[in-house]
Image (tube, grey):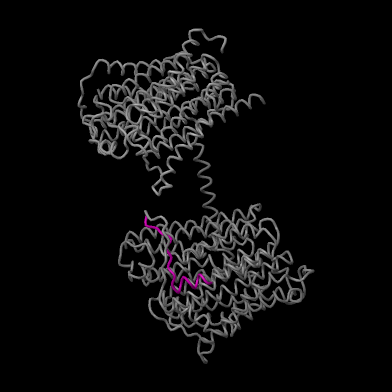
């Protein structure tokens, strides 16, 4: 299963990166979204996969019984998901502002001061 | 927007809204012992208001919130920082947890999670409302 | 008590700012505190003489072993007395000099900041603490040189001084690190107390070179001396205080301080003596060539600093005594001359020596102070300067004659400069606009005090014996015979002194033709500095547009290609990762993976924005399902909600970006695709590599065991977020809040733009 998830996160990175190299602002942002999902998946998979229980202590126990999923990468990824959302929304608004000011969504045209 | 939304959406939203709100708070409260917590709960509550906005329009959603999302962010951050300062008043390091009733999970971590919950609601709603004003 | 008193000038900064901006009389009251400190340090000097050095510390950054620890012995207290005592006079003088001009408060506040830093520098025990204060003096000096920041040349000089002395400061930091590495001690008290000598340890040559780089830049030794004359753009009270009496002597202090544990080797002695001697000559030479009163005094300060440096290098008992007596004498006469120069400029509006003359009737008190100071500088008997020069010649008698000849020449030139600065403005036919009113006492009393101190200490040499003897005993690590006296009988040294005086009289008489004939005028070290500066500017002007093309695409390509090359290089050297311990693949998990991949690919191929957003969402749901299947319900829940909200937000904005077709030519797309495939491939390989080399989780075990007993929570992920690592989460929600307010602000701006445009 690691193999498949490695390929999946490779695909997310590759496609995200490809879109970020395009000239449209919107493509750049979609690419950013794919890339951040890819990064989260990367961390999650790199932390070690297990089909076992979630890291939640059962009602009748006082500590986690093996096997359990590693909670540390989960905590990292959880905050990263929400931050990723904030970054995405922020760049979306930034792109929107640039678009309305420059009158175009072509990054090359914006850079050369056109529009 | 209000005029174009369908009756089904509006009826659905009216029923779903309180349920989603309750679910969000439920996620927050059980978060310490089972899957959930401030982040997930906050997102669900924010989603509830966004649904309301789609069904009844921006003004209605703002009214339903009862306060401005900026205030939610501010009070959430204050709660989180306050839950850190409280132990400092008892001579403990910043953000050390203090428990009043561990069995029911009442202590500063709960306050902290509540702060996270409020911030997340405020952030999502500011972003949505601002973009919706366009 | 000691730490608090050392830092007390810092505490007075707000008061200095407030009072300094009020009336002159009130501002003068500020001088009471440094005066009290002078008394305190003076009394402490007496008790140190009896009972040995005092140590005191306040807890500060205990975790890295740096406390506010201070060490007071004869040497540091001698400096502390000078810093606080002259500081009191300067505060008084400054209050009158600035009057009620705007900026008076800023001046006093910065002055107090400097005073605190300088006291900290000379009293610090820990080398790293010393470094911090060292840099703080440099920084406050920067502020004061650039005090009149409207003038471009003031700004340029301030930056130049900061760069040159900052370079030395880095040397000091590096030396401190090396000293701690080789001895295990960073406190002066232990370095001195253990009687260590670094010469036998590691890194010795590097330590010496770095320490001396710091000392030479700070004390304006050739070839770093050029910043000091340029620093004369500072208000004159600053020049008198920082750039003649105190800060520039920090290098002397450092060398004296380090001599017991770093000195007494040919490298140390040779460098210090050589550089000091050259500086002594160069400074004196340039001093008589100047016509600007302050620059002339600055060059003579450079020369005097070189002289003290050379004496410390010579390092015999007499030489060290000579250096310390000279230090005290120089602080008195040079301080007085600077203050008089400031008064002259303040009252006549010029400081060009050729435009000043005959002012003795207009400002008699200033003329008296200047004359007394000039006599001490020229080394007339009865003055402290004479004692210093006698000791200087005596200590050089046994050394090669070149040093002695150099010292005589420099002394003669310095004496001449002293007479030009202190006597020529007041004698002869009146020139320069004489002031119509009496010169206020605040501008003359401090100079008179300093000038009379030089005379008093010369007549009663016992007054400097104790501190100078104590300090030189500290430098040489043995009791020193500190008895000083004016009269030694008819000795060769007396003959040399008299010869010097005759030379001074001769040079002074022919001063104008001397000034015209002097050659060479510059050694070119400042030109070298400027050339280096220009070169660096040109380099960055050349490199910046090439490295910063302001194109996201080229940044990304460079970044990713570099990362890819590094990854593949690692794979080539380390070999491919072992095939992963493939867990069997369940159909529902495969479905999630297919969702991810299909969504991502369809986002790339999308022709309309709405389908791209939906594809992103599908791919995100696939990720959420994966989280769910592998024991992370919290993540799954969050990912589902975030994915939904993202789609909502995109929909709100994306009708602006309806068109989604490609703009780039196919060659660009091919290049992008190639790099992307390589990038995605290398990420996948890295992930496999990590998976094959996974270490069992130790952190997880800790959290799993402590979750319930310590944090009373059963959901370990949530416990980590709100308890164990709550500080990180707090940072995170702050970032979120910032992003939200950023969104609001951006929208506000673009809405305004649209209304205007």
Q: Nearer the viewer, residue A4 or C548?
A: A4
Q: Quadrant of residue A16?
A: top left
The magenta segment: C64-81
Question: Taking C518 as reference, is C652 above or below it?
Answer: above
Quadrant into which the C terminus of chain C falls:
top right
- Residue positioned most to the top: B7
Give the residue at the far bottom of this rendering: C489
Residue C94: percent from the left, percent from the top?
65, 64
In the image, what residue occupies the spot 66% across and 52% down? C150
**Can you give x and y, in whole percent of width and height, for residue C145 in the image?**
60, 58
Q: Judge by depth and name the residue closer to the eye, C16 or C106.
A: C16
Residue A29 sits above or below residue C418 on the image: above
Can residue B9 be seen in the rendering of this structure? yes
* Residue C549 visible from this viewpoint: no
> What residue do we see at 55% from left, 9% from top?
B4
C577 sits left or right of C389 in the view? left
Residue at far right of view? C436
Give the camera-side residue of C199 and B101: B101
* Residue A50 is one of the magenta-drawn residues: no
Residue C88 locus on image (x, y percent): 59, 69
Closer to us: C159 or C658: C658
* Residue C414 in the figure: left or right of residue C71: right
Q: Position of residue A73 (x, y in %)?
A: 32, 32
């Amino acid at each position: 299963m690691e193999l498949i998830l490695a390929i999946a996160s490779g695909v997310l990175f590759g496609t995200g990166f490809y879109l970020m190299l395009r000239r449209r602002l919107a493509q750049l942002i979609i690419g950013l979204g794919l890339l951040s999902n890819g990064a989260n998946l990367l961390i999650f998979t790199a932390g070690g996969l297990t089909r076992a229980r979630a890291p939640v202590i059962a009602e009748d126990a006082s500590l986690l019984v093996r096997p359990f999923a590693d909670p540390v990468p989960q905590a990292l990824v959880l905050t990263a998901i929400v931050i990723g959302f904030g970054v995405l929304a922020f760049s979306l608004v930034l792109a929107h502002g640039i678009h309305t000011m420059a009158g175009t969504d072509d990054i090359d045209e914006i850079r050369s001061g056109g529009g | 927007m209000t005029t174009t939304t369908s009756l089904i959406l509006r009826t659905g939203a009216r029923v779903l809204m309180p349920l989603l709100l309750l679910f969000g708070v439920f996620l927050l409260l059980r978060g310490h012992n089972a899957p959930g917590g401030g982040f997930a709960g906050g997102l669900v509550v924010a989603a509830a208001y966004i649904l309301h906005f789609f069904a009844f329009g921006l003004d209605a959603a703002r009214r339903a919130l009862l306060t401005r999302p900026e205030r939610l962010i501010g009070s959430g951050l204050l709660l989180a920082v306050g839950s850190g300062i409280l132990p400092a008043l008892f001579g403990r390091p910043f953000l050390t947890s203090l428990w009043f009733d561990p069995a029911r999970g009442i202590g500063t971590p709960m306050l902290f999670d509540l702060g996270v919950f409020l911030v997340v609601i405020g952030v999502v709603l500011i972003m949505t409302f601002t973009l919706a004003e366009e | 008590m000691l730490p608090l008193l050392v830092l007390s000038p810092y505490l007075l900064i707000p008061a200095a700012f407030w009072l300094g901006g009020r009336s002159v009389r009130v501002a003068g009251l500020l001088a009471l505190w440094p005066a009290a400190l002078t008394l305190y340090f003076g009394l402490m000097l007496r008790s140190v003489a009896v009972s040995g050095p005092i140590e005191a510390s306040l807890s500060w950054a205990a975790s890295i072993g740096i406390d506010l620890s201070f060490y007071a012995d004869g040497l540091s207290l001698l400096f502390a007395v000078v810093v606080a005592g002259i500081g009191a006079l300067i505060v008084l003088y400054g209050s009158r000099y600035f009057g009620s001009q705007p900026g008076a408060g800023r001046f006093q506040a910065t002055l107090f900041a400097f005073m605190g830093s300088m006291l900290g520098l000379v009293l610090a025990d820990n080398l790293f603490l010393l470094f911090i204060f060292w840099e703080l003096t440099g920084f406050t000096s920067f502020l004061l040189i650039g005090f009149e920041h409207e003038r471009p040349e003031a700004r340029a000089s301030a930056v130049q001084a900061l760069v040159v002395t900052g370079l030395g400061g880095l040397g000091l930091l590096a030396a401190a690190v090396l000293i701690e590495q080789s001895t295990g001690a960073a406190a002066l008290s232990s370095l001195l107390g253990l009687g260590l000598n670094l010469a036998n340890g590691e890194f010795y040559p590097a330590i010496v070179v770095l320490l001396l780089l710091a000392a030479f830049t700070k004390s304006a030794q050739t070839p770093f001396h050029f910043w000091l004359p340029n620093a004369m753009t500072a208000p004159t009270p600053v020049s008198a205080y920082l750039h003649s009496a105190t800060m520039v002597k920090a290098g002397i202090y450092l060398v004296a301080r380090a001599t017991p544990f770093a000195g007494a080797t040919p490298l140390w002695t040779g460098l210090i003596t050589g550089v000091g001697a050259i500086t002594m000559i160069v400074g004196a030479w340039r001093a008589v060539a100047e016509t600007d009163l302050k620059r002339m005094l600055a060059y003579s300060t450079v020369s005097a600093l070189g002289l003290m440096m050379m004496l410390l290098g010579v390092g015999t008992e007499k030489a060290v005594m000579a250096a310390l007596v000279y230090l005290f004498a120089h602080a008195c006469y040079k301080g007085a001359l600077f203050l008089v120069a400031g008064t002259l400029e303040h009252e006549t509006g010029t400081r060009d020596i050729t435009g000043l003359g005959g002012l003795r009737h207009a400002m008699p008190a200033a003329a008296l102070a200047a004359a007394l100071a000039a006599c001490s500088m020229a080394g007339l008997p009865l003055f402290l300067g004479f004692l210093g020069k006698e000791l200087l010649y005596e200590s050089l008698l046994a050394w090669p004659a070149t040093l002695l000849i150099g010292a005589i020449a420099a002394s003669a030139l310095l004496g001449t400069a002293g007479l030009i600065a202190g006597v020529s403005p007041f004698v002869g036919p009146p020139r320069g606009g004489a002031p119509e009113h009496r010169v206020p006492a605040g501008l003359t009393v401090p100079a008179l005090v300093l000038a009379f101190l030089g005379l008093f200490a010369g007549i009663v040499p016992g007054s400097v014996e104790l501190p100078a003897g104590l300090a030189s005993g500290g430098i040489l690590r043995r009791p020193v015979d500190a008895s000083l006296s004016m009269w030694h009988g008819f000795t060769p040294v007396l003959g040399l002194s008299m010869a010097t005086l005759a030379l001074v009289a001769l040079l002074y008489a022919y001063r104008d033709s001397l000034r015209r004939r002097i050659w060479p005028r510059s050694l070119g070290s400042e030109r070298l500095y400027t050339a280096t500066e220009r070169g660096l500017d040109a380099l960055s002007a050349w490199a910046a547009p090439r490295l910063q093309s302001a194109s996201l695409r080229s940044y990304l390509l460079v970044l990713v290609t570099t990362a890819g090359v590094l990854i593949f290089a690692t794979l080539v050297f380390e070999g491919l990762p072992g095939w992963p311990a493939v867990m069997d693949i369940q159909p529902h998990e495969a479905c999630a993976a297919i969702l991810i991949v299909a969504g991502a690919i369809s986002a790339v191929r999308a022709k309309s924005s709405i389908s791209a957003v939906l594809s992103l969402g599908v791919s995100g749901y696939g990720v959420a399902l994966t989280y769910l299947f592998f024991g992370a319900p919290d993540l799954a829940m969050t990912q589902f909600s975030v994915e939904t909200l993202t789609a909502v937000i995109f929909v709100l904005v994306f009708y602006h970006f309806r068109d989604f077709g490609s703009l780039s030519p196919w060659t660009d797309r091919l290049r992008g695709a190639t790099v992307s495939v390589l990038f995605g491939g290398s990420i996948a390989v890295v992930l496999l590599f990590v998976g094959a080399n996974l270490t069992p989780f130790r952190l997880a075990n800790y959290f799993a065991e402590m979750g319930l007993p310590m944090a009373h929570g059963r959901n370990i992920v949530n416990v980590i977020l709100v308890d164990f690592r709550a500080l990180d989460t707090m940072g995170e929600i702050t970032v979120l809040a910032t992003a939200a307010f950023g969104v609001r602000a951006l929208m506000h701006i673009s809405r305004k733009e649209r209304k205007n445009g």
